[in-house]
Amino acid sequence: MLSGLARAWRSFRPLTTAAILKTKTERPRLIPALAASAWLSSVILVLIGSIVRVTGHGLGCPDWPLCYGRAIPPAYGGAWVEFSHRLFGGIAGVQVVLLASLAWREGRGRPWAYRPAVAAAGLLAVQVLLGGLHVILELPPQTGLVHTGVAMLIVGLLAAQLAVSSPGLGPLRSGLARAGAGRGFGGQISVVAAATYALLLTGSAVTRSGASLACLAFPQCGAAASVRQPVIEIHMLHRIAALAVLVLTGWMIGTLLSRSPQTAVRRFAYALAGLLLVQAGLGIANVLLLLPMWSRVLHLTLSAVFWSAVVVLWAAVLSSRSAGTPSQVDRPA
């Protein structure tokens, strides 16, 4: 019997070793797919969150973490609209945690290979608590602003992880490295990224303060005499921030096109310009059409996509610069 067990073990051990080696070989390949899935889920979560807000169902579930004291909400339309946000948040959260665990395990020693995902997982814990607090306190503007800010940071960190790990973005990384776009360009893209994030925060402040229709004309304000001045100032601050992002991003795109003949880099620059123009058009439509639901939802969702594109470029530039040479940029894990 013992000899039979020994023979079985000898025949089983090579299979076990091969399976382990195969798993270790394929594990790094899961990171780009998981990063893409987690990023896409986070953007969809922003989309669902915007639907919850514009439809007025933020308190569809008036308690937290349960909904009307139940794990599965009752058959109320508003409850299920809000509960869908929680449910999809859980799905996205699992992906973020798995991504962080896998990236940290495979990328230790290479900071860009794991730090964005790990930071996203850390912020996820903060975001869950903020979401619960926002509901318990019955949607005060302050927690809503912070909640939006943290959500966009998570989206950006997942975009950064995707930028440094996705084989599909390899031509962009190597193109930036070969063109030398990293020399002096890191500061420029960092300014654009900071301005874009500030624009996201001012947009959230406009919504949370009720200043969305403080100005009814464009490009002038056209505010009614009854509108309070502080509300007008919040609205106009968002417009000024949007103009600053438009100018800074145009400057950055011009720099990219003048420095790099690489096809991947130029295509990305043109795509970024297209996103910027569509987003500006949606912002104007919000004012002139008096906040239709479709434009509000699209405006917030595309703001997350535009922010992600800026972060992808930022991470690709800085990671390619830190790698030092084009051949090192896309070295497999």
Image (spheres, grey):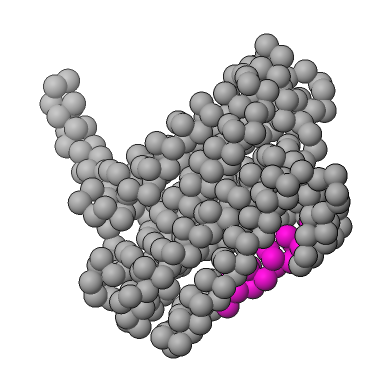
Q: Which residues are magenta?
A: 270-287
281 and 119: which one is in front? 281
| Residue at 20 percent of width and 51 percent of height | 109
Q: Is residue 46 within the magenta segment?
A: no
Horizontal side of 149 relative to 45 (left or right) equals left
- Report which quarter residue 175 is drawn in: bottom left
Q: Is residue 271 within the magenta segment?
A: yes
Horizontal side of 153 relative to 55 (left or right) equals left
Q: Residue furthest top?
A: 69
| Residue at 17 percent of width and 37 percent of height | 10
* Whether residue 151 is visible: no
| Residue at 36 percent of width and 42 percent of height | 118
* Whether residue 69 is visible: yes
x, y percentage for residue 176?
A: 37, 76
**Magenta: main secondary structure:** helix
63 and 136: which one is in front? 136
In which quadrant will I find the C terminus? bottom left
| Residue at 36 percent of width and 78 percent of height | 181
x, y percentage for residue 111?
A: 26, 53
x, y percentage for residue 74?
A: 77, 18
x, y percentage for residue 297?
A: 74, 50
Horizontal side of 213 relative to 331 (left or right) equals right
32 and 69: which one is in front? 69
In which quadrant will I find the N terminus? top left
